[in-house]
Image: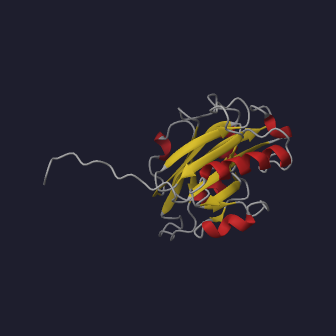
């Protein structure tokens, strides 16, 4: 095998992009691991919760063969009672059974609402999943016409939600698509919390390149002459 260093392939700019609303909260992670029932339950660190997988076959003792271990994290640390982040770990523990419907893996999203950043005028806090290719919230009416772009997406657990999709399509004229999404948020307000008048901005994801960019409605630096 040659040890000559290969130059990475360059993705085509016109390949599909997805633009979602950027939510102003705090980053949240839900990690779900499927393990044999009773695996190390007594030795689990604080903040790891076990939920029986009752969809799995039952053993001779009448208990399921598998269980889930559920853990909450923030942007840079695992959370636990006494070391929480705006109550996110507590919320995950209270809703662990339903959240296990997300399946094994790491599920990233934004924990937002009352007392977090701009608050969105809410009396409660919510968790919005980022992965719109895997999940959608059937309660979102605004992005109904865009769901055909994500044929494998499934309804999210009712205790959670999903960031709203503002655009899904080719990246040929990305500047125009971003400008239209920005204008839509400025005129209609947030789609995450219907009509909230001060949304934060956009997240632009280039699928072929695997790159993510953000566009803010306020305080974002732009070259002179480029309108928002």
Q: Residue at x 67, y 61 (%)?
A: 136
Q: Quadrant of residue 219?
A: top right
Residue 105 position within the rendered picture, expressed as x and y whole percent measured from the top left = 50, 53
Quarter holding the N terminus is: bottom left
Towards the viewer: 12 or 67: 12
Note whether residue 125 is visible.
yes
Q: Is residue 61 left or right of residue 5?
A: right
Towards the viewer: 160 or 187: 187
Query: Disc count in the image?
Result: 0
169 is higher (above) or lower (below) than 48? below
Q: Residue at x 35, y 53 (%)?
A: 9
Quarter holding the C terminus is: top right
154 is higher (above) or lower (below) than 177? below
Q: Residue at x 50, y 66 (%)?
A: 61
Residue 155 position within the rendered picture, expressed as x and y whole percent measured from the top left = 67, 64
7 is higher (above) or lower (below) than 56? above
């Amino acid at each position: 095998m040659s040890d000559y260093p290969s130059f990475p392939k360059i993705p085509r700019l016109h390949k599909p992009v997805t633009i979602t609303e950027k939510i102003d909260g705090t980053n949240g992670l839900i990690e779900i691991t499927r393990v044999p029932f009773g695996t190390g339950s007594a030795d689990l660190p604080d903040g790891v919760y076990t939920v029986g997988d009752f969809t799995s076959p039952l053993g001779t003792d009448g208990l399921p063969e598998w269980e889930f271990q559920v853990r909450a994290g923030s942007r840079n640390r695992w959370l636990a009672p006494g070391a929480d982040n705006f109550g996110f770990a507590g919320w995950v523990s209270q809703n662990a059974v339903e959240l296990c419907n997300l399946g094994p893996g790491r599920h990233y999203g934004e924990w937002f609402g009352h007392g977090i950043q701009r608050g969105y005028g809410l009396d409660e806090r919510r968790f919005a999943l980022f992965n719109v290719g895997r999940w959608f919230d059937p309660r979102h009416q605004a992005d109904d016409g865009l769901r055909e772009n994500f044929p494998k997406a499934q309804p999210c657990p009712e205790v959670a939600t999903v960031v709203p999709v503002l655009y899904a399509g080719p990246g040929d004229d990305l500047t125009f698509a971003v400008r239209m999404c920005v204008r839509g948020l400025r005129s209609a307000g947030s789609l995450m919390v219907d009509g909230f008048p001060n949304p934060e901005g956009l997240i632009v994801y280039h699928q072929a390149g695997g790159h993510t960019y953000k566009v803010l409605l306020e305080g974002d630096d732009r070259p002179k002459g480029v309108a928002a």
